[in-house]
């Protein structure tokens, strides 16, 4: 992909920083298309002089998308939200991108969706993800779609969020305790995206799912985190009726622990379909969660990286 012009929508986000770094390493030129380019400037040092560009863009605005794509060879869409206007950012935005890719004869389009994308999903999130995929394929049939499980990494709102709660509160209610996840390391998702693009057109028009080497329940994940940071907590499985009531009554609050829609998402396991396993298809070794224990979860320990669980 040396010297190709690649546009990354949502490139300033958690996953975006890793995708940009992986793409820049191939020698490609990268254009980061985000609503606030000032928040993406940290990406600039990842590449060489003049290798990175920035453009203000709201994917729900077709004119913005048209300008962002102009002159590009490859498009990557990473835009996704967990709550808010799903129609705007999971369906209308991807449709704008795919239609403009067809209009401008873009070589490749890769769209990142999520495991759980299902038109029959009880959650609006899952249904919107499925509708977004449909809109992409209808407008650009050769698009690739990547569906990761829960993504973790140094800056995530997943392991860090739970570890933060475990470090502060002795009693932890666990919602969806038996729901299974297959957490995947953010740099591994970036590697998969880069491999798919580099091996096109052999892998055009396909759906890939991405998960890590461990399948773990929500309760087991919390227990693993407690052990990792040397915390002795009491974990209490919250009954579905209680969790549902809490999500309904408080889910609308800005700092709510879980929304009604997110609770519905926990009703189904978030693991890879073996027939769509992208990590195995490209022989990419998946990184275990142990890397989080070694590299950044130490900050949640009582004495940081000098903490000795044997003495607590």
Image (spheres, grey):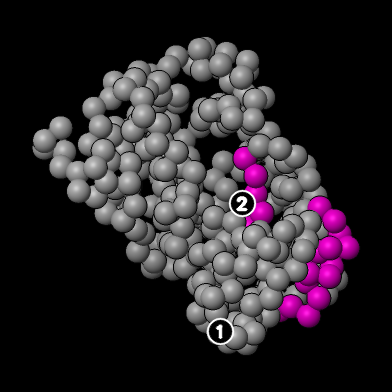
Give x and y (percent) for residue 98.
Answer: 77, 62
Q: Badge 2: few (under 14), some or many (20 or more) residues near its Cα, within 10 Å?
A: many
Residue under numbered circle 1: 48
Residue at 46%, 35% in the rendered image: 269
Q: Is residue 217 visible?
A: no
89 relative to 239, above or below: below
Residue at the spot of label 2: 113
Say which of 227 and 264 sits in front.
227
- Residue sitting at 67 percent across and 68 percent down? 32
Residue beneath the point at 69% across and 76% down: 53
Work out whether residue 22 or residue 302 is closer to the camera in this orientation and state it.
302
Q: Is residue 71 magenta?
A: yes
Q: Position of residue 253 (x, y in %)?
A: 65, 25
Residue 303 in which image quadrant: top left
From the viewer's perspective, tell me whether residue 312 is left or right of residue 196: left
Quarter occupied by the C terminus: top left
Q: Residue 20: in sight, yes or no?
A: yes
Q: Which element carries disc 1, helix, strand or loop? A: loop
Magenta residues span: 60-82
Mark 2 and mark 1 lie on one chain; the one further toward the N terminus is 1
Q: Quadrant of the N terminus?
A: bottom right
Identify the image quadrant of residue 307.
top left
Q: Give the farthest residue toward the right.
A: 63
Side (left or right) of 126 relative to 286: right
- State the residue in front, 174 or 273: 174
């Amino acid at each position: 992909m040396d010297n190709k012009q690649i546009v990354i929508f949502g490139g300033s986000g958690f996953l975006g920083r890793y995708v940009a770094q992986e793409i820049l390493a191939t020698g490609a030129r990268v254009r980061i298309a985000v609503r606030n380019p000032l928040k993406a400037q940290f990406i600039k040092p990842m590449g060489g002089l003049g290798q990175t560009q920035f453009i203000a863009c709201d994917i729900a605005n077709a004119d913005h998308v048209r300008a962002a794509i102009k002159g590009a060879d490859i498009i990557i869409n990473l835009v996704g939200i967990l709550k808010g206007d799903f129609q705007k950012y999971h369906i209308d935005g991807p449709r704008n991108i795919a239609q403009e890719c067809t209009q401008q004869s873009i070589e490749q389009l890769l769209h990142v969706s999520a495991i759980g994308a299902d038109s029959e999903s009880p959650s609006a999130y899952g249904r919107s993800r499925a509708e977004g995929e449909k809109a992409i394929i209808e407008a650009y049939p050769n698009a690739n779609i990547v569906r990761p499980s829960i993504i973790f990494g140094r800056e995530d709102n997943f392991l860090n969020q739970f570890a933060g709660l475990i470090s502060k509160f002795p009693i932890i209610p666990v919602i969806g305790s038996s729901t299974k996840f297959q957490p995947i390391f953010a740099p591994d998702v970036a590697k998969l995206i880069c491999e798919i693009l580099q091996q096109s057109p052999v892998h055009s028009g396909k759906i890939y799912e991405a998960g890590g080497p461990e399948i773990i329940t929500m309760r087991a994940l919390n227990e693993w985190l407690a052990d990792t940071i040397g915390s002795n907590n009491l974990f209490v499985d919250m009954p579905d009726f209680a969790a549902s009531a809490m999500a309904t009554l408080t889910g609308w609050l800005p700092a709510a622990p879980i929304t009604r829609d997110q609770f519905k998402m926990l009703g189904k396991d978030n693991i890879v379909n073996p027939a769509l396993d992208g990590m195995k298809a490209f022989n990419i070794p998946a990184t275990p969660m142990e890397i989080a224990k070694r590299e950044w979860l130490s900050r949640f320990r009582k004495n940081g990286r000098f903490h000795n669980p044997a003495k607590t």
